[in-house]
Image (spheres, grey):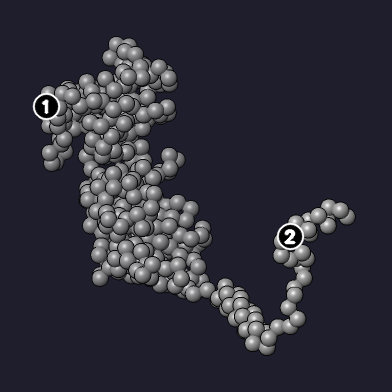
Amino acid sequence: MTSRVSKKSDRLLVRDGRRHYRRKFSAGESRIGFLLLLALASVLAWVAWKGAHPDPTLFMLDTDLAQASISRAADRGPLPARLASTGWSEGDVSEFDSDNLYVKINGREGYYKSFGFERLHFLSILSVADPQTAVDIELYDLGNASNAIGAYSGERSADVVSRADESGLMHFDRNALYMTCGRYYLRAIGSEESAEVRAQLEHLQSRFARELPGEPLPWGFALFVGRMGMETSSVSFKPENAYSFGFARDVYSATLEGETELFVMPANTSADAGTLANRFREGFSQYGTEQGELIKDQYLGTYATAAAVSKWVIGVYRASDPGAANAALASLRDAVRDFPAPSGDPLSAELADDNEKVSEPDEY
């Protein structure tokens, strides 16, 4: 009790904080207080209503970035007509170039640009009965048949067997179609796995095979498939940085049983081919030890090497044992001995750049 009294006695003005000393309030003050409470209640009601009915443009930019970045095609470009079969309808055609490809495939644009990307043509085919059922068509213009096959091979599963025809390579997946037609790489992805979607995919394959301009399969297929009798699905193309070597460009490879690979790279001259073969061997040696002509990987225990045959650089990579490596390399040497050089000007070894460093091979 004493403490409570002492606290009140310490107050200089109002001894009882909850007590007021005005006898009454004026009518004007009461009205002002009522109006203030009414205004606050109105603001609270407005905030609650706006929260339940947001403005749809509230979070939009003055110009919608996605729509501004998509170029609506004035025409169909290389897309054939009548891509929608009976019971399906087409959406709008869109085009993407190197500047806005990220809008469509953000995170994967670097992959396609590594294969000479020039333009993407996009179109959706919708089921009339159920618009939720769709097939999205992505047609990539990659400049030439080698780049198209390279991109296709890089996305093909190891267990897929491709079919080769005059137009290029193709295969069906559970709900998708992948194929090359000359310089073009086609991906058609269905929203579901069904007979209806599969029929539409088969229609697309037929239309693109007939209408898109094809090209003869590149020299790598003529060598590995035509001359050496390998499966088309075993052949791959690497336009640059093959085996993580900066100098290794325009390289075709074919996978044998297991993980053994044979590879071929063209050069301008026989001297360039010899220099490039030495660079391959130097690169393989960074993670291995020389055993005669072969280099044994110190981590995997596999064998690799490279050699020059005329204007060709040939090699074997990740062979399981020396015998398999030497036999595979010998068969490749015989195949390229009189094989005609590819059309165009192959990349040289850039002999003037003596300071160029050899990139490290693939990490394990």
Q: Residue furthest top?
A: 292
In which quarter of the view is residue 98 placed?
bottom left
Identify the residue at horizontal 38%, vertical 67% (top origin).
61
x, y percent for residue 38: 63, 82
The answer to whether residue 183 shows anywhere in this view is no
Around disc 1, counting alpha carbons within 10 Å, would you say few (fewer than 14), some (14 to 19), or many (20 or more)? few
Identify the residue at horizontal 75%, vertical 75% (top origin).
21
The residue that mark 1 highlights is: 352
Q: Amino acid at mark 1?
A: Ala
The circle drawn on residue 263 is none
As helix, strand or loop, the secondary structure at mark 1 comes to: loop
The residue that mark 2 highlights is: 11
Around disc 2, counting alpha carbons within 10 Å, would you say few (fewer than 14), some (14 to 19), or many (20 or more)? few
x, y percent for residue 244: 31, 31
Q: Amino acid at mark 2?
A: Arg
Q: Nearer the viewer, mark 2 or mark 1?
A: 2
